[in-house]
Image: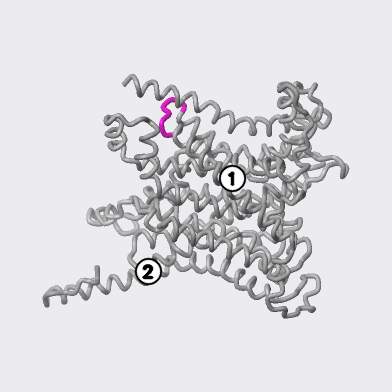
Amino acid sequence: MKQSAKGTGIWSVLAVPIMLWTAVPLLWMLSLSLKSADMLADPDASLLGNFWPKDPTLENYELIFSGGASELFMPALRNSLIVCLLATLISVVLAMFCAYAISRLEFKGKKMILVTALAVSFFPVVAMVTPLFEIWSRTGLFDTIPGLVIPYLALTLPLSIWTMSAFFQQIPWEMEQAAQVDGASSWQAFRKVIIPLAAPGVFTTAIITFFIAWNDFVFAISLTSDRARTVPAALAFFTGASQFEQPTGAIMAASVVVTIPVVILVLLFQRRIVAGLTSGAVKG
Amino acid sequence: MSATPPTTQAAKGAKSPLSDRSRSEQRLGWKLAMPAFIVMVLVTGYPILQAVWNSFFAYRLTDPDNRRFVGLNNYLVSFTDQVFWSAMWMTVLVTIITVVVELVLGFIIALVMHRIVLPRRTLRTLVLIPYSIITVVSGFTWLYAFSTGTGFVNQWIQWMPGIDANYNWFGGFWSSLFVISLSEIWKTTPFMSLLLLAGLAQVDTSMEEAAKVDGASWLQVLIKVILPSMKAAVMVALLFRTLDAFRIFDNIFIMTGGANDTSSLSMLIYRQTIDRTEIGLGSALSVILFLCVLVIAAVFVKAFKVDLAEGRG
């Protein structure tokens, strides 16, 4: 007993550097977003050796929401939301049917579908860029919303299928039949019993799928030019007032803005996200 | 199931409605799985076939009519180009560095998350955040942290006696590689630790206890009991991360843009295709990258006996 208590103490102490290692870059991101251009390179204007601004300002946030950088950031934010939500919706619906079939029904080719999904997830996305760029240029899909949604399906479907199959396998499907025996219709049984059981898995898959699409950079910079440009690509092509000035503060303010929703999702659903990420990859 | 032959007439008679059911189940299964399957095959299969085809032609997007069959020339050009080998070196180096560090760091973090009692939820949440944020964002954050003048890293180094505080981290290959790897490690170690944590959860605690009772030290328990039973989880995590690291792009694009020979294979493909519109050369490089990834996956599956389908149980 004594020994395990001592062990716990050591592990808790070890947690401190891990938390610092995670948190310092996040705080740094926030700190930069609160610095004006003059403060950036001036250690005297900051605390802790250039780390935290003595006199925080919100001017970078004004810049991206209503100022000079808003024309670049706001459409990109809108594009990101539309593209990622569409890709998530389509991917999750397709994966849901597929995962239902895999975890519930016996049919030949089940294993082949899982292996295909695995092979697709191993696929180097950049290898798709050259042919897609060429095809999209010829068909007019270049720099359009569907032109991004389609490749995002390839990014997200494999993980959606694996994750959801793992979740669905844990559902006791016999309960559906039991409900039917008790007098419920098939649809009632499905709606009252299966949907509530499956919903958490579907929801978790949707969050992870959204993260993957939200994070994409390769397709975003290769298959768009300005109309369909998403946030990651827009950040990379942010330019300052003059070409010699790096718009550091504006980039970091935009970064904070797109990171906050992610942090909130993680805070709310951390247990489910962990379950989703690990169930698809390690165990069923 | 259906492999068992029916032994009696009664069983034979009973089998027919069953196989009817299984046949309709077959059809339903395929119908439901088909859309996802078709999308996956079309969206990845078609481009890779197109890339293989295009790789045999000298061809620029800006001049599509001037398309010549050149056989394997694009591959020859790539293999004799010093830039290709430097990109290959960078890719291999960054893959080995990040995967090894992430494995060690990820395992330590997984152990702490596994053992810790008190701030468990906080720790788990915090660890998940870097994994969830955009790579471009973490790339910029680390880029600015190490930038001369703007960054805090040089300022913090200055606190140590006798060290030049204005080190130009992006001035050379090795220091650029260091910062790129750091950003990559910060971002993806959480994924590694979560997979390893899942592996740790599967370790039989009774065996751990038994070993402790027998007087095994903590390190002995780790090496003799914990690690062997985590082998599957470690291998799957390694495979996923190796393939992922081999495709490194975002961090390099943001931090150095490929300066000082830091271009990876993916960066090189992007440069050839999008910047120079050399579709033929870009396609050949894509096929090479694709083959490299296939080889890595095959090595893991064969040599380390990673059974991915089994791993899911």
Residue B181 position (above or below residue B120): below
Chain containing the residue with disc 2 = B
Secondary structure of the residue carrying tag 1 is: helix
Report how far apart the C-alphas of labels 1 and 2 lie in the structure. 44 Å
**Is A84 positioned to the left or the right of B174 in the image?**
left
The amino acid type found where label 2 is placed reads Leu
Q: Is residue B116 magenta?
A: yes
| Residue identifier under label 1 | B98
Q: Residues within 10 Å of mark 2 (few under 14, many from 20)?
A: some
Tell whether label 2 touches label 1 (CB within 8 Å).
no
Q: Could you tell me residue B45's position as x and y percent?
A: 56, 69
Residue B110 position (above or below residue B54): above
Residue that sits furthest to the bottom in the current view: B69
Disc with the residue nearer the chain's start (1 vs 2) = 2
Secondary structure of the residue carrying tag 2 is: helix
**Is B272 positioned to the left or the right of B198 in the image?**
right
| Magenta part, dominant SS | loop
The amino acid type found where label 1 is placed reads Thr
Residue B264 in view here: yes
Chain containing the residue with disc 1 = B
Q: Quadrant of residue B59?
A: bottom right
Q: Quadrant of residue A252?
A: top right
